[in-house]
Image (cartoon, rainbow, N blue to C red):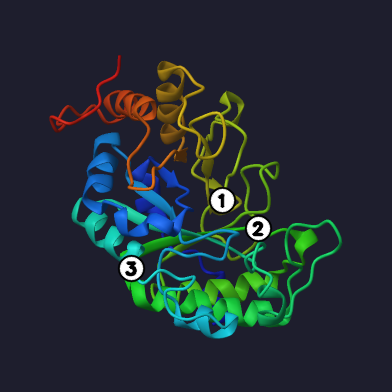
Amino acid sequence: MEQLLHQKSDTHWFRRSGYGLFCHYLDHSRIKDFDVARFVDNVVQTGAGHVFFTLGQNSGYFCAPNATYDRYMGYQAGERCAERDLPMELAGALMERGIRLLLYLPCGAPANDEKSRKAFDVDKPAGAFDWIASPTLRDRWAEIIEEWAQRYGDKVSGWWFDGWFENNGMTEDIAQAYAKAAKAGNPEAILAFNRNIEYGIRPSCVYEDYCAGERFGYFAYEIPTQPLVHGTQWHVLSFLGSFWGKPDIRYQNAYLANYVKQCMAGGGVVSFDIATSLTGEFAPEQMCQLYYIRKAVREASAFTTQTVLPT
């Protein structure tokens, strides 16, 4: 298994995708209202080749069932993990349109749920936000990941693990455990482990297939000249708006379209964090910009009558 985990999964499909979307869907109180069909229609209109979607983040609420999580945390089904399996629905609908789904998940237990302390044998220094990793966290969080991975199989093409920070006690053995769990359902799933937004576009550990690539912006000085960085697929992620999940735009259309084209020419992949409403709608101004990018990059003109046209 050691040898397998050190072998990179094929990222050619990710490279061909060129650009895609990153959706921080975190308010699960309205998950029943999420319109998968409308969401996927909007994704198609943007020209995105892939979509990252959050399973959950720091609240301890997740948009999919997970009996393993419920058991360790002492919750009833539906109390923290939704009864509706939103990723399963999204994966099927996106796959029908030729678009790949990747999932976002933190490396650590939910920071805002005190039950994590006992469930995962973790603690946090005074004033700290995140829990410090422990062997129990490593083993149990890997079990939680594996339940999702086994259920989704090859419907999920990759994972983006957040918070792989050294000051939180994250180590190579934790990445190894998570990689083994995530690839249990799909051995070809591609993985990234995010260190922090200032780390740069470079691999974090040997278990990565592509760079997490979290940045404060889409910078002209970071255009790739080749697809791989130390054997790992080049990938950048930042926010289309003024910050994560904000509905405005901060770049000129022409600049961003040219940036994407140059990154793709160098073999890189670009992901845009966009605002996503509780029902799965995209912000109109961002849809306009993504329409422009699709037209400039994909050179496509087949849009539905509901497409939000740029002004």
What amino acid is found at the position of numbered circle 3 in the picture? Arg
Residue 284 coordinates in the image, percent (x, y): 34, 28
The residue closer to the viewer here, 203 or 248, is 248
Residue 241 coordinates in the image, percent (x, y): 50, 30
Instruction: Mark 3 vs mark 1: give the one in front.
Output: 3
What amino acid is found at the position of numbered circle 1 in the picture? Cys
Give the residue at x 56% y 24%.
220
Q: Which residue is mark 2?
A: 163
- The quarter in which the C terminus is drawn is top left
Q: Earlier in the sequence, mark 3 or mark 1?
A: 3
Mark identifier at residue 92: none
Residue 162 coordinates in the image, percent (x, y): 60, 57
- Label 3 sits on a secondary structure element that is loop
Give me the C-alpha separation between circle 3 and circle 2: 26 Å
Give the residue at x 34% y 62%.
86
Q: Which residue is mark 3?
A: 84
Give me the C-alpha separation between circle 2 and circle 1: 14 Å
Q: Earlier in the sequence, mark 2 or mark 1?
A: 2
Give the residue at x 46% y 33%.
263
Identity of the residue furthest to the top in this view: 311
Image vertical order of residue 28 relative to residue 150, above or below: above
Identity of the residue furthest to the right in this view: 126
- Label 1 sits on a secondary structure element that is loop
Question: Is 190 displayed left or right of 141 in the figure?
Answer: left
Q: Which residue is mark 1?
A: 211
Residue 168 coordinates in the image, percent (x, y): 76, 63
